[in-house]
Amino acid sequence: MENKKAQITLGVLALLIIIFIFCIKRIDAGHAGIKVYNYGDDKGVSSIVEVTGWTPYNPLSQRVYEVPTYVQTANYKLDTIDVDKNTELRFNTKDGMVVRIDASLNYSTPSESVVKIFRKYRKPVKELEGNVLRNLVIESLNQVCGDYTCEQVYERRNELETKARMHLKDFLGKEGFIVEQFVILGELRLPRTVVHNINEKVNATQIALKKQQEVQQEFFESQKRIAKQRGDSAVIMIGANAKAGALLLNADAEMRANNKINSSITDVLIRYNQANMWNGAYPNTLVTNGQNVILPLGK
């Protein structure tokens, strides 16, 4: 009897453990839970309820999904090795070209949108990243980039990225997603013809800038030469003015000296100097009325 009770007790405990493991699911913090009935109207889609905490369910007829409500990151990148893993984004431009990019999308799903998203797509959010969510992003990019040519997409990348982010917030918001950030990663992959045209334009621009710099440099050099010539002319002019000034000062000094000498000469001074210089002999010839008179000189 004792053994039978023990066996029953062990059986009940085992059953409870099985129920706990397979029939109860815990919804962690930062997540939203949804219980889906596998049977019923519209295959159970109309019988979806939101659950939290420890949630019992019947694994035969029900399924519980745990969906994160915090910010998640979906990366869409080119994979040249495994084609099935290639999730790069492709969109069309105004001139019918196809642009390929790598991008990163940060998004979240509030708890109140989890049931709505599941009811529409019948998959948990994480399973939507590689198909439904990616297609929505591509559709949004097509709407934004339809106003740009391929070259404009390259030239106005930052503007395009900002517009795409704003459009995605509104576009995906209507689906129940909250877009936190959208960033284009790395280089844009453009058609070869467009890349060639862009390179030609860049080269032409660089050549024009180089020519402009050379013209500016020549202009600056000519200005320097003109300034130097003006400086040399100024130095010569200053030297000439200085020399002329010196000559004028010298002439003025001589004039003043002569004026002083002239003002100091008198008849008395002249006779005095003549008397000092006379040796006592008379001249042999005297000039009177235009006639020469020879005077006899005595011994």
Image (tube, grey):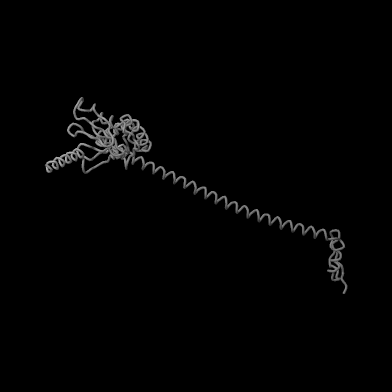
Q: Choose between 17 and 66: the one closer to the eye.
A: 17
Pick the quarter of the image with the N terminus. Answer: top left
Residue at the front extreme of this rendering: 1
Residue 172 drawn at (x, y percent): 32, 31
Q: Is residue 51 visible?
A: yes
Q: Choose between 277 and 5: the one closer to the eye.
A: 5
Residue at the top extreme of this rendering: 41
Residue at horizontal 34 percent and vertical 35 percent from the top: 179
Residue at horizontal 66 percent and vertical 55 percent from the top: 242
Count of picture labels: 0
Q: Choose between 2 and 86: the one closer to the eye.
A: 2
Q: Choose between 107 and 116: the one closer to the eye.
A: 116
Q: Is residue 193 visible?
A: no
Q: Answer with left or right where residue 236 lies relative to residue 22.
A: right
Residue 189 drawn at (x, y percent): 29, 40
Using the image, determine if residue 260 lies above or below residue 32.
Answer: below
Residue at the bottom extreme of this rendering: 299
Residue 168 drawn at (x, y percent): 33, 33
Residue 236 drawn at (x, y percent): 60, 54
Quadrant of the image occupied by residue 69: top left
Pick the quarter of the image with the C terminus. Answer: bottom right
Quadrant of the image occupied by residue 266: bottom right
